[in-house]
Amino acid sequence: MINPITDEEILYGLQNPYHPWQYLCCMTGVTKRSYSSGMWPRVFRETGGIGFLAREHKKIVGQLVFMPKKYARRIGIPSSPVNERIEETLVIGCFYVLADYSHRGIGSNMIAKTIEFCREHGFTRLEACVDPRPPHISGGNTSFYPFRKFGFTIDDSREGWEFNPDMRVAFLDLE
């Protein structure tokens, strides 16, 4: 089941040391640095959400966290340098599905819900840092494969992460 991340989960869920997010990607690091600054509640209030969690029973098996481009730039999430429509762009900062749950459509469903969120909240562009190589070669990086079926394009103008030269920014214009 895929549900939006709630304001309660933002305020209280990450503070619990046994919360399943500790096993997933970016939110653990955020707890240590940006979370205490109040960024995530502010993004939630301004945007209407910060992403989705995929659960099987009560276990979190996937997450997709997004933010407006102005916040992504502040915390160093790669975004396309050829797009300066900052207020109209949503950036996926974290996308993850546990390996045991891959190839079940969970990632695709979270991407589809994010595209729907963009349309409902006035975002005209969606960006994500991805590895364009096939999933079996990408070594655990966010693969481009689930994004391509939605019409995303790779922006080859620069590397996605400076420490990982294989990563690129993928984008989807919704206009």
Image (tube, rainbow, N blue to C red):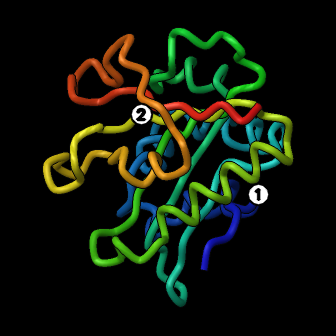
- Looking at the image, which residue sits at the far bottom? 57
List x then y, in percent, for residue 16.
Answer: 53, 65
- In what element is the residue under mark 1? helix
Label 1, residues with CA under 10 Å away: few <14, some 14-19, many ≥20: some
The mark that comes first in sequence, 1 or 2, is 1
The CA distance from mark 1 to mark 2 is 25 Å
Tell me the residue at 56%/18% (across/down): 73
List x then y, in percent, for residue 71.
Answer: 64, 25
List x then y, in percent, for residue 116.
Answer: 75, 53
Tell me the residue at 85%/36% (across/down): 122
Image side of residue 56 versus residue 142, left or right: right
Q: Quadrant of the C terminus?
A: top right
Instruction: Give amino acid for label 1.
Output: Asp
Image side of residue 15 versus residue 137, left or right: right
Label 2, residues with CA under 10 Å away: few <14, some 14-19, many ≥20: many
List x then y, in percent, for residue 109.
Answer: 57, 66
Q: Nearer the viewer, mark 1 or mark 2?
A: 2
Q: Quadrant of the N terminus?
A: bottom right
Which residue bears the numbered disc 2? 129
Q: Nearer the viewer, residue 166 or 150?
A: 150
Which residue bears the numbered disc 1? 7
Instruction: Give amino acid for label 2.
Output: Cys
